[in-house]
Amino acid sequence: MECEFPSVNSNNEEIIEIFKNTKTIAIAGLSPNEEKASNRVAKYLKNAGFKIVPIYPKEDEILGEKVYRSLEEIPFKIDMVDIFRKPDAIAAVVDAAIKRGDIDTVWTQLGLVNNEAAAKAKEAGMKVVQNKCTKIEHAANF
C-alpha cells in the first residue's frame, strides 16, 4: 500500500476534547518489547492515568494488563482504539470498532493512514485521528 495523506483527521481542539473524554484505550498491536514505540506509548498513557487494554496475538500480560487477541474479546467499554498496525490491517480494526458500537475514537499512529477506513469510522459516528502519536499529542496539550 502506498503512503496516503490523511483526508480525514481531527484538529487540535478536537484532539484535546478526545483526551478529556477518554478513560480506556485499547492498543491494537501493543508489543511486549520495551524498545518498540507501541510499548513506550502505552507505558506513557498508563502513567498519565488512562486504562490501557493491550491487543496482541501472543502474551497473557503486557505492562501489567491482561492481553486480548481482538477488540471483540474485550468485555467492557472502550473509549479509543489506538492502532499500531500496518495500513492494510487498519480496516479490519476499524470494522471491529464499528461492530462493537461503543468506541468513540479511532486513532492511527505516526506514519499510519487509511483514508477509506477513516471515512467509514467517521460515517459510523466516531472521531478519527490519523498519523499522530497519542503520547506526543497528550504531552503537548496536558
Image (cartoon, rainbow, N blue to C red):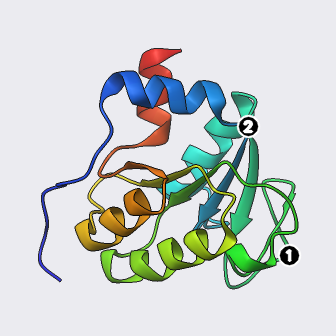
Horizontal relation, residue 135 to residue 108: left or right: right
Label at residue 90: none
The percent coordinates of residue 90 (x first, y second) are 41, 74
Give x and y (percent) for residue 36.
51, 59
Q: Is residue 35 visible?
A: no
Q: Which residue is mark 1?
A: 60
Rendered-image quadrant of the N terminus: bottom left
* Residue 22: percent from left, percent from top: 66, 36
Instruction: Please state which amino acid type lies under the numbered disc 2.
Output: Lys
**Contact check, label 2 and label 1, Cβ < 8 Å:** no
Q: Compare residues 53 and 115 and report the one nearer the observer.
A: 115
Instruction: Place residue 117 in its image quadrant.
Output: bottom left
Vertical placement of 22 versus 102: above or below?
Answer: above
**Amino acid identity at mark 1:** Asp
Q: Residue at x 62, y 76 (%)?
A: 99
**Residue drawn at (42%, 19%) of the image:** 140
Q: What residue sits right under mark 2 in the picture?
A: 23
Marks 2/1: CA–CA distance? 22 Å
Q: Picture coordinates of residue 66 (x, y %)?
A: 87, 65
Residue 40 in view (yes/no): yes
Binning the other alpha carbons within 10 Å of mark 1 as few (below 14), some (14 to 19) or many (20 upward) gives few
